[in-house]
Image (cartoon, helix red, strand yellow):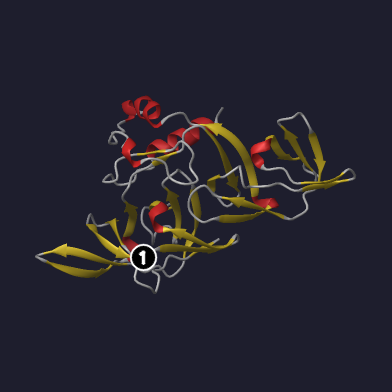
Amino acid sequence: MILLLAACTQTAPENPVRAVLDDGQVMTGQVQTETLLLEGGMGTLAIPVIDVGEVVPVEGGDLGGSGNYVTVWLRNGSELRGRWADPELTMGIEVGGSTVDVDLPMDQLERFQLQDGQFWPDGEIYRVTTSWGDDFLIDPETTRFEIENELGVFAPFLSECTSVEPLGDGDWRIELATGTVLIGPLTSDQVDFQLSMGPGTISAPLDTIVGIDRENWGSYEDNLYRYSGKGYSEEPVDSSAGEMPGLQGAQSSSPDVWFENAMLRETKRANASR
């Protein structure tokens, strides 16, 4: 998968960012960008920058050591992974009463963060993992699975299903909440997942889908308490922020907090082991 991060050509709102370099320098300032463009096996995805929490190398410490392979964390815990091709980033740093434009040495980049903290998805969620290392949340009310067999063609929404799984011979088994069980091949060699945050749609080839799981992560406050002994100390939830479209019942941490993936990562790991 090829990942390309670039600024829009049009003037975009300024977004506060923080870049950590491997020599200990930290650059905090503004970047003129509105979307991140993700190009790869799932096509070109336009990710609104306000949905991005951070970008980190997959391994190797810095971007150069990882061979430009990175993980893009969205604020709701979704992860999109790939290679950042020809990365460039210019930041405006406020110092001495003026703005200094800095072209970051991208091979030294260890972490690229944005503000607004987490946007915790309360209640029931649907999570997709792929063989490429992606791990993202989807909207079950608008994502369909279309199956065809000798009885006809059926296209239930994921929210109608209690389970969706491949049988290993080209057929899939879909069980609905009504008790209906459908078995047969899907009508397409890919699934168009509607995301609850980030790019609107991700079209994943069937042979790359590792899991489609229904989970409940609990409330932001409960998880903050559960993991407080591990050194997580985020600001209290800012309930005045309200709900974000597409994330029913979600809560956001303080908008002045830099994004951290630690609590989201622990929660995902705990659910995967159940």
Q: Label 1 neighbourhood size at 10 Å, few (<14), some (14-19), many (20+)?
A: many
Residue that numbered label 1 is attached to: 33
Q: In the shown orientation, is residue 206 left or right of residue 221?
A: right
Residue 181: % across, % down: 79, 34
Nearest the viewer among 122 and 274 is 122
Q: In the shown orientation, is residue 232 left or right of residue 149?
A: left
Q: Residue at x 23, y 66 (%)?
A: 92
Q: In the shown orientation, is residue 193 left or right of residue 48?
A: right
Q: In the shown orientation, is residue 81 left or right of residue 75?
A: right
Nearest the viewer among 150 and 70 is 150
User: The N terminus appears in which quarter of the rendering?
Assistant: bottom right
Residue 164: % across, % down: 70, 38
The image quarter containing residue 150 is top right
Q: The disc labelled 1 sits on which kind of residue?
A: Thr
Q: Residue furthest left?
A: 96
Image height of 233 relative to 23, above or below? above
The answer, for residue 230, to whether it is visible in the render is yes
Q: Residue at x 41, y 41 (%)?
A: 243
Secondary structure under tag 1 reads loop
The answer, for residue 56, to whether it is visible in the render is no
Q: How many marks?
A: 1
Nearest the viewer among 53 and 179 is 179
Q: Residue at x 34, y 46 (%)?
A: 259
The image quarter containing residue 67 is bottom left
Residue 126: % across, % down: 57, 39
Residue 120: % across, % down: 42, 38
Image height of 1 relative to 138, above or below? below
Q: Residue furthest right?
A: 150
User: The C terminus appears in which quarter of the rendering?
Assistant: top right
